[in-house]
Every structure is written in C-alpha cells, then in structure tokens.
C-alpha cells in the first residue's frame, strides 16, 4: 500500500515537472515580448524618444529576470515554488497565488454545479433513452444530443442572456460571482456537457440489458426496478470516468461561457494572461491546473476501487478502460 | 413497466429541479433585500467596460485613464467636448514668454487623505509620472517645473510655444500624492470627486463620494465600474436595464438597440483614424504608384458600411479624423477610382496576366495584410478591393504578437492600427511620419515631409502651424506610406434613466461627472 | 437491441453512410450546385434574410451563405477527418505500445507524456504553435492532433491491458509468437473497434474547436469559407441575423449525426458480444 502511494506520488511530481518545464520553454519560445505588451499597449500618442523606451524596457526586463537564460529563469521559478511563491503578475504586480485563489472559488462553484447538472441530465436521459431504445423518445433524445454537440456554445449562451436577462429580466448581468448568478452559466455548461454522459449511459445500459443475466432475470420475472438498479450500478463506473474528465475540463476554465456570462473564473483570466504574455501567471495557472488534474485522477481511482472491488486485483487497467 | 420507470425518473428529475430552486431561493432573498435598502438611501451608477485598471497606481500603463473615467483622478486641465481646454485642478495658466508658462492652482484643494494639493505636491506628482510612466513622456519630457510660491508653478519648456495646458490634460498626468504608495485602496491618494473604496482586478472598481471635494459635489453617491469583457454581453447588460453606461458597444450590436426607449446610443465622433500601415522596405511597396493604387482601389463609403456598420465616415487623410481638420477628409482620394488604380499599376509596370493577376518580371504583385482583434472583417473587405484591381491580396488574421514579431523581423507588407489624432499636431505627426517616430512602422522617410515637420516645430503662429499640419497631412496621403480609412466608431449605450451624460470624443473625460443624476428607477 | 443487429450491416450503419454520402456529394459538387460565387461581395445585399435567390440568406459582405457552406465543406470535412485520422493513428500506436510494454519504462514515459498533455492548457499550445509556425489551417491541425491523440492512446492502452489477460493472447505468447505479431494480429484489430467508435463521436467537437480557435488566426484565412470560421464570424451578427449560422450548423449537425450512426453501426458489427465501452 505504501509502495503504491509512493509510486503514485513520484509519478505526480514527475508529471508536474514535465508539464511546467514544457510550458516554460514553450512560452519563452513563442514570440511576442511581455515588456512590449505592457509598455506599448494603447499609448495615447506615438513617441519619438526611443531611448527612454529602450531604457524602461531593459529596466523591466531585468526586474522580471527576463534577461537571464531560460534555465536560470526556470530554476528561479522552481526555487520560488519550493518556498510556495508563484511570483507576481507582470500586469497587476500582485502575487499570482492571490490572484488564482481569488478566481478559483468562482470556477469551482460553476464546475461543480455544471457537473452535477450534467450527471443528472446524463443519468436520467441516458436511462430513459436506453429503456425506450428504438422508440420515439429515444430518437428525440439522441437528436437533441447530436444538436447540442454541434451548436457553438455562444449561441446557447447569448440566447439565454437575451431571454433571461433582457426579455424576462430575471437574470442579472454583472461581473460578480454569486449564487443568484450561477444558474444560467451552469445550465449552459450542463447542456453542452450532458450529451457525452447520456451517450455513455445509454450505450452501457443497452449492453448490460443485453447480457445473459439480465435476460434470464427478465425471463424469471424479476422486478424491473431491481434489474435497473443492477444495470445502473455497472453503468456508474464508465460514468465516473466521464465525470472526472468533464470536471478536469471545467476546472481548467470554460473560457467562452465565463466570458459571455462575465463570470470571474479562471479560464478567461488564463486566456487574458496568455495573450498579455504574463509569464508568471501562465506558469502558475499551469501548475495549479496540472495539480488539479492529478488530484482528480487520484480521487477517481480511489472512488473506483471503492465502487468496484475487482479493481484491486486487475490494477489500473479497468479504471482507464473508458477514458 | 416501462411507463412505471419513466414516471419514476421524471419524478426524480422534478424533485432535483425543485430542490435546486429551493436551494437558490433563500440565498437570493437577503441580497435583494440588501440592495433594495441601499437603493432607497443612495443612488448607484453602474458602468460596464471592456477592461478595468490592472492596478491602482496611476503611473502604471492605462490605470490613470480608468481612474479619470470613474471620477477618482483629475489632471490640472481638461478638454471639453468641443475640444477646448479648460482648467480642472488648476485655476488657470498664462504664457509668460515663448519658453515659460505659469500655472495657478486652486487654493484649499486637498487629497483624499487631507494632504494639501500645493505647488510642491503637484510638481512631485508630475515628476513621479515623468520618471515612472513611459506613456507620459510625450507630454512631460520637455517640461521643467519650479514652484514660485505655494500655489504658482512655473513651467519652462524645451521648445518654443509648447501647448502646456493641453499636455497637462492627458490622463497620464493626473495629480496624485507622490508620497503615497498607491498599492491598495487604503494607500492610494488622489483628488477626484469619488474615492475608491473597493478594487478587484479584472472584475470591479467601487467608488464613493469624496466629502472633501473642492468642486461641486456629485449627486450620485456610489459608482460601480465593472469589467464585462464580451461586447455582446455588455450590450445585453445595457438592454437589461441594470447597467447605466455600457462603454465600447460593438457596432454589430447596434440593431439590438433600435426601438428601445430605455437605452440611448451615443456615438460621439472620435479623433482616431483606422489606418493601413505599409512596409516601405518591401520591393513592391517602394513604388509610390503601387501605394497610391492601393488607396484609390478602396471604396471607403462602402467600407464604412461593411466594416463599421455605417457608424463612421470615410476619410482619405490621417489627420482628418480630428474634428478640427475635418476639411481634409477627402483631400486626396476623394472617391473610389479603380480605373485610376489600374492605370497607376500599368505605369509602374505591373501588367495584368491571363489569370487577372498583375505581374512584373515574372513576379506576381502580392500584398499580405495582417489584422488582429476585431479587424478581420475590415481586412476581408480590403482584400476584396485589392483583388479587384488584380493584386494577389492575402489577409492574415491573428494575435497581435504575430504583428509585432513580423515587424521586428521585417517580414510584413501591411497591417492595421488606429492612432489618436487629437493633440499637439506636431507631436502627433512627428510620432507617425518622422524617421524616428515610434508609429512609423514602415520606415517612411521623405525629405519634404521632414522639412515640413521641422518648419512646424519652430512655427509659433497657430494659424500658420495649422496650415503646415494640413500640408504634411496631404503630402503623406499623396506619398501613401499609410492609407487612412475611417475614424474608429465609438458607441456608448446610456440608460435613459441617467441624466446629464454628454457626448465626448475623449471617452475618459466624460463618463463620471458631478452633474450626472439618476431619474426614478424603473421596475426591473 | 437485437433488432439493431439484423444482418451483416446494421441499420444505423447504412443510414449513417447514406447521410454521409449525401453530404459528401453536396460538398464535392459545390462548384456545380452552389447558386452563387462564394467569394463575391455585394454590399447592397448584405445580411439578407433567407429568400428565393439566397436560400440561407447572405452574410455581412452580401455573400451567399448556402454557397459558402457548400464550398466550405470540403475544407472542414477534409481537415477534420484528416486531423482525426492522424490523432487516431498516433493514439492507437502509442496505446498499443504502452499496453504491450506495461510496467516497463516505455509505458511509464508514455503515460507521463499523456498525463502532461491532458493537464495542459490547450490554448497555450495553440498560441505557441501559431506564433512559432505561423497561422493557417495546417498549423491548426498540428495543434489539434498534438493534443487529441491522447484520448485514443489512453483508451487503446486500457483495452490492450484487458485483452492481455485473455486466453488467446496468452496462448499466442506461449506458442512463441513475437511481440509484433501479437500486436498486429491480435491486439490491433480488437482495440480498433472501441477507438473507432470514440473517434466518430469526437468529430463534432473537433469541428467546433476549429471555430473556437479562429480568433487566434489558427484556421482558414479569409476569404476561403470554412464551417468553423463561418460560425465564429457569424457571432457578431448572431442576435440580428442568426440565419448566417444556419447553413454551417445544419451541415455540422448532419455530419455529426452521420458519424454517430456509423459509430453505432460499427460497434454493433465489430463488437457485438463485447461489453460496449462507450
């Protein structure tokens, strides 16, 4: 047991190291100078004093350590990390950890709400679709799933805003994250994510319903409720895998939904920082996200082994069989 | 049996929905009640903008423009909506001789902290901006300040007859307490009629009345500036009635506002020219005839419709987006003339081949236009005009860093920028067209232009200087290192509840004013 | 269930192939079928609602949306199928190798790469690729493939791990068959089916990703029509002229539907007794 834990921990640290290193190199390789972005953006009047510009740019570069080699910069970042310091944002000058901590709760709230909705919709309509396979209700559900998977998110988001905020006046457009503002972005994300889960539930339930034991149980006249419960139980495992993937995606930020609903989450913040070349923020964001994904994976595995004791024998294989 | 399960599932779904609503409801109520109480006591002005200040320190890039816009910061002077300069924190200014100005300050003005705004404090503030804010350079680097007495500042200028009050009206020169550290809401110290009480970067800025304000006290007690980055969402927030002022409404959202009584669209003309910059180091663009042909081929009238939804006017010279120089709008390329463009290309030796493309010495005449942000449609329309005269035109749309990188490596033909055209014309034109100008991206170097600019620099008579500016403007349009298209449209959605909002071509000047008031709140 | 498995070719597979064939015909025949020039701008006819002369209306430049949709199909479909196929090939190979050499360093390294990519902000990669190699469609594909293969690799690996414990593979190993032989003869065909099915489901989100990235300049450059960028461009006018989105959306819905049906049919045909993975 201890051996397994140590191995998993080592793997996690290795992944973190790889991800941050690759990102570090990539952001530095990509052209575009953060200093120029900061100094040059929307100046009121074009300057003729280029010497002053150069001097200020050099000053900022050395202040942020951008004049050092990439290796030194990375080592400095890792050293900071060991002291739990992610550095300061070039754009706002505030600690990256503070900024991420400010934005993460809004993202987490939205992610959990959206995931719950996805699961409820997925289980209910997936089961409905499987039970009535081939009937009109099954077809309707599948058509809606295909449509939802093919419509751009902004269409759903803007139509919702137009209706609920402007026409009906029941939704408030502001820049705050509050419970009363949560439901519309959550519903939007729930709707786009649900088809995936509906699909998995339907397919697995159909397969399970086709199994011999179910057929014979049916033949023996066992109560459908009991059979459904049994079938549902074995469907839960793949659903769990889907849910963990979905949660990982939601935590790293739903950029379009956040931006349309002015939800102060981490996705829009990360994208802005990427466009502004705010290196410490990109770096800190990646670190936090990789950690989150690793944690979600570990958690999923743990839940898996609780739900399905066979795992302990088979090892990781089954836990990933539906990834 | 199937029916039974289905109803079970539906029941489950219904329960969850009800439970979900039930959870939401109690959370909503206290908030509504709270905001209701607040509204009874005091009025709140809500502004939605695309972005918000990155920090609170006015010497950080752009920060002072947001502070100025929200009524927290003031400069010594301001510009009214007619383009006239008025005193703000200063009481007045007087030109003593060609190199000297004297500025009188208002007596008894205090910072939020209570510290006195005297000559020493103002000079310290301006010196801090000069030292730390690169964008303040064009306005402050030629000025030297000395305190003559407690309320009088002497300004010595490096050049003759510099427009000192104009320079000191830019947001980069706002007066702040140079001794404060300006890193949190508590430590920032300015003079505006509102003081900042809450700041969340990339989210919101909240301000309340400054009780010690020197001027007329505002009637609205609270101002909330929110960042709503998506343009369509900003438009919808104005339409929903919650936001009183929504800045930078996309032109494409305009039709949503037609027929709305609750929201008015304010479209003040802005002094800002949407312009194509050409890279004169490229062999095909070294020929002035090719550059002129590119300009003649553009149907600016139609372009305004395609790329700006008709919310602008065509201009053919750069300076003419400034209302003072409106007469120069069609000074050179007065209408679309593709025939003339074709002739110019023929003369330059670029002859049309069988495929319709023009070529010289076996090389096809091609141009690659780089666009970014919201200018994709503009690029696509331009591409169409240039294709029509036989040029192989490509549009490359992407992130701004791609344009920057291309400029550094020299591997670009054309790109689009929009610079402000209001201000001291010499500074503006020199920044664009002198060989050292930082906005002279395409290495334009023309003897006549340089000579005219030099004349402008030393000219003391305002009328003669204006005449020279027009000459430079025309010369540049004829030489076509840049192609001016139209003033960038600037739409603001203003709630009809809000009284006293005035159009202004400088957006940061006129959003929060003391005489704004909110009418009776509509039922929302 | 049984109803769906009639004969060698399940109903859904046939239906999917028919729809896909129809779409392919429409797209391939665009030069003949399109009523207008997809590039011709007519300012006087801009943002027109659907009418007899413009069945799906016109866009902000007065271009015919139907013609652009038909012409844009070849680029969108070609590119997304190509991207999917490449991701599939890489994913299958990596998954097979990782599964085959389970508990060796090969597997460890591959899994770390996969974990890293899964946790990686896709947008960063896209921007870096655009900046390093330039904008354009090919680079968009590189960006997408370099992330997308991960899902297929994970799935393949897990299937291989499950199969390895089965008797036929064990028997082959006992009989002395080489690793390559086992990989190619035994594992590949059986891993194919769940992976193929996953692939057919991924197509829709792939096409939508094309549109999400077009603001970075990754994607078709103007004026060439492409469904993804048509959606992105149509957003500006969406609330007044939603019809601009109708053409590309309809075609994407039909394509995704066709691929879903094919996926289901394939599952029934290739994998009739296995427990469905997806």
Image (cartoon, coloured by chain):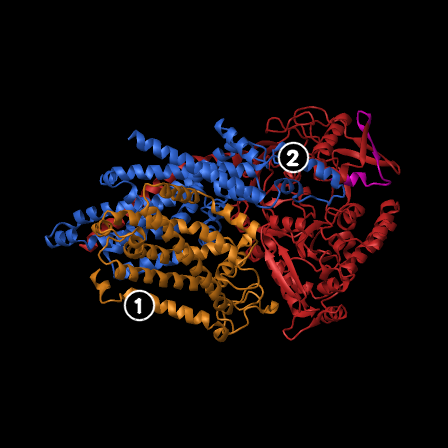
Chain colours: A blue, B red, C orange
Q: Quadrant of the N terminus of chain C?
A: bottom left
Q: Is residue A57 left or right of residue A286?
A: right
Q: Secondary structure at mark 2?
A: helix
The percent coordinates of residue B153 (x first, y second) are 81, 30
Q: Is residue B483 left or right of residue B234?
A: right
The percent coordinates of residue B478 (x first, y second) are 79, 60
Task: Tell me which corner region of the image, top left, top right, bottom left or bottom right, holds residue C8.
Answer: bottom left
Pointer 2 indicates a residue of which chain? A
Which of A43 and B446 lies nearest the eye of the viewer? Answer: B446
Which of C165 and C29 lies nearest the eye of the viewer? Answer: C165
Residue annotated with mark 1: C14
The percent coordinates of residue B17 (x first, y second) are 33, 45
The percent coordinates of residue B409 (x first, y second) are 66, 50
Q: Which residues are magenta?
A: B147-169
Query: In the image, is residue B10 above or below residue B314?
Result: above
Query: Does the segment drawn in magenta span residue B155?
Result: yes
Residue lying at 77% horizontally and 58% vertically, measured from the top left: B477
Residue annotated with mark 2: A60
Q: Secondary structure at mark 1?
A: helix
Instruction: Say whether residue B36 is visible.
Output: no
């Amino acid at each position: 047991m201890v051996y397994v834990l140590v191995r998993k921990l080592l793997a996690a640290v290795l992944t973190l190291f790889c991800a941050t290193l690759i990102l570090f190199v990539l952001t530095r390789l990509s052209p575009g100078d953060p200093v120029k972005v900061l100094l040059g953006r929307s100046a009121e009047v074009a300057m003729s004093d280029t010497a002053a510009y150069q001097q200020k740019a050099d000053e900022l570069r050395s202040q942020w350590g951008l004049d050092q080699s990439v290796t030194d910069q990375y080592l400095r970042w890792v050293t900071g990390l060991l002291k739990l310091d992610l550095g300061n944002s070039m754009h706002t000058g505030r600690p990256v950890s503070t900024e991420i901590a400010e934005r993460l709760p809004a993202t987490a709230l939205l992610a959990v709400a959206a995931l719950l909705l996805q699961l409820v919709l997925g289980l209910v309509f997936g089961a409905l679709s499987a039970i009535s396979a081939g009937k009109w209700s099954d077809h309707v559900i599948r058509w809606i799933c295909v449509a939802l998977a093919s419509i751009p998110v902004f269409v759903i988001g803007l139509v919702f805003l137009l209706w609920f905020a402007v026409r009906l006046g029941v939704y408030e457009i502001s820049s705050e994250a509050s419970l009363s503002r949560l439901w519309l972005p959550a519903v939007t994300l729930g709707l786009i994510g649900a088809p995936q889960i509906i699909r998995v539930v339907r397919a697995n339930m159909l397969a399970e319903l086709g199994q011999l034991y179910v057929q014979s149980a049916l033949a023996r006249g066992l109560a459908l409720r009991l059979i459904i419960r049994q079938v549902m139980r074995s469907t839960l495992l793949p659903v769990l895998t889907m849910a963990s993937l979905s949660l990982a995606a939601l935590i790293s930020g739903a950029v379009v939904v956040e931006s349309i609903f002015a939800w102060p989450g981490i996705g829009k913040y990360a994208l802005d920082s990427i466009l502004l070349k705010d290196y410490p923020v990109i770096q800190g964001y990646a670190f936090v996200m990789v950690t989150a994904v690793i944690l979600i994976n570990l958690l999923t595995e743990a839940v898996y082994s609780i739900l399905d004791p066979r795992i302990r024998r088979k090892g990781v294989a089954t836990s990933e069989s539906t990834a | 049996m199937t029916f039974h399960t289905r109803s079970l599932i539906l029941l489950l779904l219904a329960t969850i929905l009800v439970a979900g609503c039930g959870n939401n409801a109690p959370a909503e109520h206290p908030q509504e009640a709270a905001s209701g109480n607040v509204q009874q006591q005091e009025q709140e002005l809500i502004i939605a903008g695309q972005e918000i200040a990155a920090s609170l320190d006015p010497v950080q890039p752009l920060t002072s423009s947001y502070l100025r816009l929200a009524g927290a910061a003031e400069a010594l002077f301001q510009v009214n909506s007619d383009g006239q300069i008025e005193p703000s924190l200063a009481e007045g200014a007087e030109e003593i001789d060609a190199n000297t100005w004297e500025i009188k300050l208002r007596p008894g003005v205090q910072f939020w902290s209570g510290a006195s705004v005297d000559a020493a404090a103002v000079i310290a503030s301006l010196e801090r901006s000069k030292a730390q804010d690169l964008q303040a350079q064009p306005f402050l680097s030629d000025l030297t300040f000395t305190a003559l007495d407690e309320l009088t500042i002497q300004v010595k200028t490096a050049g003759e007859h510099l427009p000192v009050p104009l320079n000191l009206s830019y947001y980069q020169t706002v007066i702040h307490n140079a001794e404060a550290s300006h890193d949190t809401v508590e430590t920032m110290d300015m003079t505006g009629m509102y003081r900042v009480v809450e700041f969340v970067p990339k989210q919101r800025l909240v301000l309340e009345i400054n009780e010690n304000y020197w001027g007329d006290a505002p009637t609205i007690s609270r101002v909330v500036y929110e960042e709503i980055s998506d343009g369509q969402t900003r438009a919808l927030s104005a339409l929903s009635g919650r936001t009183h002022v929504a800045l930078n409404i996309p032109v494409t959202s305009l039709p949503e506002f037609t027929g709305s009584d609750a929201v008015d669209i304010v479209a003040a003309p802005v002094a800002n020219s949407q312009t194509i910059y050409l890279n004169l180091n490229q062999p095909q663009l070294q020929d002035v005839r090719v550059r002129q042909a590119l300009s003649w081929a553009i149907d600016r009238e139609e372009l305004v419709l395609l790329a700006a939804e008709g919310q602008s006017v065509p201009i053919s010279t750069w300076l003419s987006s400034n209302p003072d120089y409106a007469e120069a709008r069609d000074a050179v390329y007065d209408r679309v003339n593709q025939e003339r463009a074709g002739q110019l290309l023929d003369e330059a030796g670029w002859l049309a081949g069988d495929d319709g493309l023009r070529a010289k010495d076996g090389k096809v005449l091609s141009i690659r236009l780089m666009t970014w942000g919201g200018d994709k449609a503009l690029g696509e329309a331009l591409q169409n005009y240039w294709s029509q005269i036989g040029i192989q035109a490509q549009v490359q749309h992407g992130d701004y860093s791609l344009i920057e990188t291309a400029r550094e490596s020299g591997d670009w033909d054309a790109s689009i920028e929009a610079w402000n055209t209001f201000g001291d014309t010499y500074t503006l034109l020199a920044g664009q067209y002198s060989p050292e100008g930082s906005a002279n991206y395409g290495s334009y170097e023309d003897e006549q232009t340089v000579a005219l600019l030099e004349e402008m620099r030393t000219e003391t008579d305002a009328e003669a200087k204006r005449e020279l500016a027009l000459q430079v403007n025309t010369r540049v349009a004829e030489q076509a290192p840049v192609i001016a298209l139209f003033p960038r449209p600037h739409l603001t959605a203003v709630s009809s509840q809000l009284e006293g909002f005035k159009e202004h071509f400088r957006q940061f000047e006129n959003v929060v004013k003391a005489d704004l008031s909110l009418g009776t709140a509509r039922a929302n | 269930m049984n109803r769906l498995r009639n004969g060698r070719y399940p109903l859904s597979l046939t239906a999917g192939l028919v729809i896909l064939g129809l779409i392919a015909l429409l797209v391939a025949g665009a030069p003949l079928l399109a009523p207008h020039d997809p590039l011709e701008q007519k300012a006087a006819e801009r943002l027109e609602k659907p009418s007899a002369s413009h069945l799906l209306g016109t866009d902000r430049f007065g271009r015919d949306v139907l013609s652009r949709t038909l012409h844009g199909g070849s680029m969108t479909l070609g590119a997304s199928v190509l991207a999917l196929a490449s991701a599939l090939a890489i994913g299958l190979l990596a998954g097979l190798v990782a599964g085959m050499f389970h508990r060796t360093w090969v597997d460890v390294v591959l899994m770390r790469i996969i974990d890293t990519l899964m946790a990686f902000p896709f947008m960063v990669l896209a921007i870096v690729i655009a900046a390093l190699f330039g904008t354009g469609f090919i680079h968009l594909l590189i960006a997408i493939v370099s992330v997308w293969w991960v899902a297929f690799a994970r799935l393949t690996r897990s299937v291989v791990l499950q199969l390895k414990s089965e008797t036929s593979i064990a028997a082959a190993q006992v009989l002395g068959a080489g690793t390559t032989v086992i990989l190619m003869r035994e594992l590949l065909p059986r891993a194919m089916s769940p992976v193929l099915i996953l692939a057919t489901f991924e197509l829709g989100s792939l096409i939508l990703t094309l549109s999400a990235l077009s603001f970075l300049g990754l994607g078709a450059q103007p004026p060439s029509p492409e469904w993804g960028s048509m959606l992105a461009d149509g957003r500006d006018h969406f609330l007044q002229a939603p019809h601009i989105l109708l053409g590309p959306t309809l075609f994407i819905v039909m394509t995704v539907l066709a691929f879903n049906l094919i996926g289901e049919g394939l599952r029934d045909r290739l994998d009739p007794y296995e427990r469905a993975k997806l």
